[in-house]
Image (cartoon, helix red, strand yellow):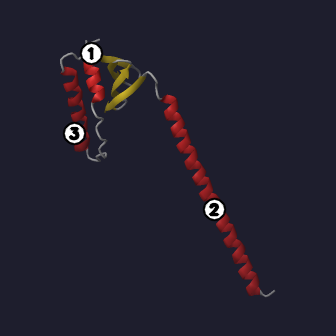
Amino acid sequence: MNEGAEGVLALNRGGDSLLVLLLGSILVIALAFVAVRWLAHWQYQFTRGRRMRVLEGLAVGRDRHLLLVQVGQEILLLGSTDGSIRLIHRIDDPALVAEWLAEPQPERAAPSNSFAGLEGAVRANLDRIRSLLSRKGGGGHE
């Protein structure tokens, strides 16, 4: 064989190994993607409660959240911090609970990168919770 033919064969072998490497990388990425999706679905199924569910959550600070949780025929407003969870308010009036559960869920807006947009969203959610708690028949305070 001459030098030109050997050079073409060496280049061809290098191209084949590059192709194998590329296909192997794509296969590994695809398998990782499928595994992550499966684990996310499994975790969602595993952590979803049968007798209770979180209706709404609102971050009000670092490691501080307000949660509306449905437990049976009651809705609880819980305050969650880094080390504790406290009951803030209990809504057990059946008519009010049915009304709240019948409300359509608000559309999730695209996250705003500005502080003003974030502050406005927090204020709007707090105002909504205040108005819901101030309705007549909102249950007793704990």
First in sequence: mark 3 or mark 1? 1
**Residue indicated by mark 1:** 93
Asked if one can make out residue 9 in the rendered structure from this viewpoint, the answer is yes
Is disc 3 in contact with disc 2, using a CB cutoff of under 8 Å? Answer: no
Horizontal side of 5 relative to 97 (left or right) equals right
* Real-space Cα separation, disc 3 to disc 1, in angstroms: 30 Å
How many C-alpha atoms fall within 10 Å of the one at disc 1: few (<14), some, or many (≥20)? some
Q: In the picture, residue 57 is in which quadrant? A: top left
**Residue indicated by mark 2:** 23
Can you tell which mark lies on residue 140?
none
Quadrant of the rendering where the N terminus is positioned = bottom right
Callout 2 secondary element: helix
**Residue indicated by mark 3:** 120
Q: Say which of 17 and 140 sits in front.
A: 140
Quick one: which residue is furthest to the right in this view?
1
Give, as a three-letter code, the residue at label 1: Asp
Give, as a three-letter code, the residue at label 2: Leu
First in sequence: mark 1 or mark 2? 2
Callout 3 secondary element: helix
Mark 3 or 1, which is nearer the eye?
Answer: 1
Mark 3 or 2, which is nearer the eye?
Answer: 2
Up the image or down, 47 lies above or below 12; here it is above
The residue depicted at 58 percent of the width and 53 percent of the height is 30
Q: How many marks?
A: 3
